[in-house]
Amino acid sequence: MYSSSTTHRVRYGETDQMGYLYYGRYALLYEIGRVEMLRDLGLSYVEMENEKRVMMPVMSLQQRFVRPGRYDELLMITTTLRKLPVDTITFHVEIRNPQGKLVNGGSVKLCFVDMNTGKAVPAPDYLLEKLRPYFEA
């Protein structure tokens, strides 16, 4: 298993009339979590797309809203890979408020696509090399 955490402060423009983080913004926080996880592993989306020619489109997004994130709160985004990817990769996400209480949780599933052919491909070796040490017994 591999986990990574990052923070995000809720900005005024991200809130609704009630001062709550607008529900449509949570998908962006999931993206922030997975981008920062890859960065923690020494990878980046830019490198994967521009140099390795692999993109990772979203296949599904599951979320549950537990309590509101509020304006100016510093939210903790924890992203976890529970299993080594094969043909797809699933990022499990928990977003917690400053008191450590769960605000939102869920998962996002992506696949790997060769940008030159437009076809789905298995998880790239360079990603698996970075992740394997965290999944070995």
Image: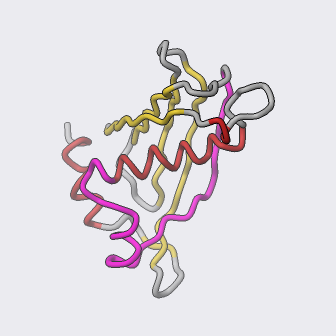
In the picture, measured across the screen, residue 100 lies left or right of residue 137, that is: right
Residue shown at 55% from the left, 51% from the top: 109
Residue 7 or 49: which is nearer the viewer?
7
Q: Residue at x 46, y 34 (%)?
A: 77
Q: Nearer the viewer, residue 38 or 89?
A: 38
Identify the magenta region: 39-66
Where is residue 88 shown, x and y percent of the image?
48, 58
Relative side of 14 to 132, left or right:
right
Above or below — where is 12 with respect to 38? above
Residue 125 vertical placement versus 132 (above, below): below
121 left or right of 101 in image: left
Residue 8 rendering spot, x and y as whole percentages = 48, 36
Which of the 4 quarters of the picture holds residue 80?
top left
Q: Quadrant of residue 83?
A: top left
Residue 43: x and y in percent read 29, 59
| Residue 85 highlighted magenta (yes or no) | no
Q: Is residue 114 above or below residue 43?
A: below
